[in-house]
Every structure is written in C-alpha cells, then in structure tokens.
Image: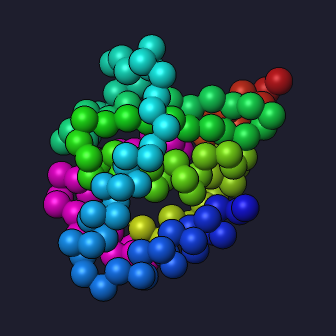
Amino acid sequence: MTIQEKAQTVIDEFAMFDDWMDKYAYLIELGKDLPLIDEKYKDNQHLISGCQSRVWLHAELKDDRMYLTADSDAVITKGIASLLIRVLSGQAPKEILEADLGFLKDIGLQEHLSPTRANGLMSMIKQIQLYARAFLLKSQNA
C-alpha cells in the first residue's frame, strides 16, 4: 500500500468515532499494538528531543525501504508513534520525504493535542524525515 492509501485507512478508522474521547481511547489501543523497539535502541542516540515524554525511534533500511520501530513512556505518545509508523514504515525514503501527512489534520489529531504533544509529534516527523534523508543520500552515494 502507498502512504496515501495507508493514511486513508487511518482517516476511515478515525471517522468511525464521533467523540474525541473515543478517538483517544483508540489511539491508546494503537499504541498498545506498537511493535516495541529493540532495547538496545532505547538510548540517548535514539531519544527524540522536543517531546514531553520520552520517545525512542529507530529506522533501518532493507531492500530500499525504511522500517521504523519506536517506544514511549506515555500511552498517547505511543499511539501517535504507532500512527506514523503504520503509515510510513515500509516505504522508500524518497516517498517518505515527499509524503503529505495531512491525514493527521484530517483525523483532527493536531487540534486535539496539547502544545507539548503537538511539538512532540512534529519532532517525531522531523526525526523520521532525517532518517529518510540520510538513507536517500547514502543510497545516492553508493
């Protein structure tokens, strides 16, 4: 599936809920299903700065596709990481860099996050894009 197809699936899932408390509950459930990052990546090198809670993010390139894993000590943040990973993991770095992440606005997430969580979301996105940019440059120089 493409990034946009995965994003549309997320939009459709969140559209099933009318109340934002239900959407938060769903986000928490998504976080519980997040495949955990290997413990060796729960270090300062993989810790995302700018997040209120602690978030670790790891990326690796396999067969020209970028795969992401993450963990957080906060359930909502873990759910947010799960959304990003679900939509972006398994895609080519170039596609990730060109991706329209408007689905986050479409599901109403950005307007329902506290300013510190919104900053954390932006920090996660920036870190994913940094990984993608590094992998893209590495493949172009190979």
Q: Residue furthest top?
A: 40
The answer to whether residue 70 of the structure is visible from this angle is yes
Query: Within the image, what quadrant is residue 63 found in?
Result: top right
Quarter where residue 95 is shown:
bottom right
- Tell me the residue at 74%/31% (across/down): 62
What residue is drawn where x is 27% and y is 72%?
Answer: 22
Q: Position of residue 80 (x, y in %)?
A: 37, 53
- Predominant secondary structure in magenta? helix
- The quadrant of the picture occupied by the C terminus is top right
Residue 109 in the magenta stretch? The answer is: yes
> Which image quarter: residue 25?
bottom left
Name the one closer to the observer, 128 or 2.
Answer: 2
- Front-lying residue, 66 or 24: 24
Residue 8 appears left or right of 73: right
Q: Quadrant of the N terminus?
A: bottom right
Magenta segment: 105-130
Who's the residue at 43% across and 82% down the image?
15
User: At which x and y percent is residue 65?
Assistant: 73, 40
Residue 41 image point, x, y percent: 44, 20
Residue 78 horizontal side relative to residue 33, left or right = left
Residue at figure coordinates x 35%, y 55% from the top left = 29
Mark yes or no: residue 126 visible. Answer: no
